[in-house]
Amino acid sequence: MMKFGIVRLWEPKTDRKNRSGASEMIAIGARALSERVASLTKLTTFSLIGVVFTALTIGGCATFTQPAVPVTVTANNDNATRLYHQAIDFSGRLSVRYQQDGKEQALHGSFTWAQTSQHTLVTLLSPLGQTLATIDITPQQSTLHQAGQPSRTAADVDLLTAQALGWPLPIAGLREWLQGFGAGANGKPFSVNPTVSGGVSTVTTADRWSIQYDTWQPIAVQAGSANSAQSGSLPKRIDLTRNTAQAGDVAIRIVIDSAQPH
């Protein structure tokens, strides 16, 4: 458009000298226009590079500050994080109260718990250390072994333990509850903060267990593990209660003596 306007402006002049002058002025104008466009292009290019570099720099910083695992909760006042461990071993003590045939029953013993992302092995022991039952859980099925009895298998581990033991042991939920995580009555995930209310917290789960976290303990992480740079705490004592059709009012107290993520 600009070239057409310049040509139209000089068309009335017909002599050679004027035409030559017109050509020279057109050339000068064209060079000036070209230099101006180049200058603007150069400026725009460097401005764009600066914007892109700034965006990449900001984006890079955001990437490095993303949490290492999806589930964390502030564990103490120094801003350390408490992590959910897919692989962890527990050992501790267990006491159970429930009803059977209208009579109060009480059991005491200890347990070991070995957990990975795809496998859980629970061993229930008598006060003297004798093995009462082992429960082996995989994504495909659960198997319960009791001394002197045939092994039992089922897809639902909680139904299996309730039928075999005569009282409910919510192993499926305990995979998370033992670490202070789980799903609440509203179906949303919860993570208990041990610094709130002196560490005592009560939650109700989606399957109607009431869980009270009474005391907490620091965790020790093996050197060289993926979470070795993290610190935090895990529950020390957990009280579970629920009313059931099978065993009436059930109360389970769990005291964790040892917790070892790996």
Image: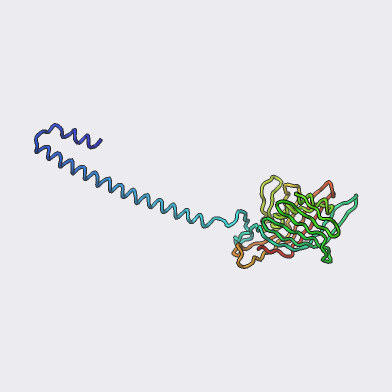
Q: Nearer the viewer, residue 173 or 216?
A: 173
Residue drawn where x is 58% and y is 57% of the image: 68
Q: Nearer the viewer, residue 233 or 194?
A: 233
State the image quarter where residue 94 is shown.
Answer: bottom right
Q: Nearer the viewer, residue 230 or 80?
A: 230
Can you say which quadrant of the picture contains the C terminus? bottom right
**Looking at the picture, how far across and down is residue 129, in whole percent?**
82, 66
Give the number of marks. Answer: 0
Q: How is the image coloured?
A: rainbow
Residue 75 left/right relative to 163? left
**Looking at the picture, how far across and down is residue 218, in whole percent?**
67, 64
**Looking at the picture, how far across and down is residue 126, in whole percent?**
83, 63
Q: Residue furthest top?
A: 12
Residue drawn where x is 11% and y is 37% of the image: 18
Q: Is residue 5 above or below residue 40?
A: above
**Looking at the picture, how far across and down is residue 260, in whole percent?**
68, 64
Can you say which quadrant of the picture contains the N terminus? top left
Residue 99 left/right relative to 212? right
State the image quarter where residue 180 is shown.
Answer: bottom right
Residue 38 left/right relative to 152? left
Q: Residue furthest bottom?
A: 223
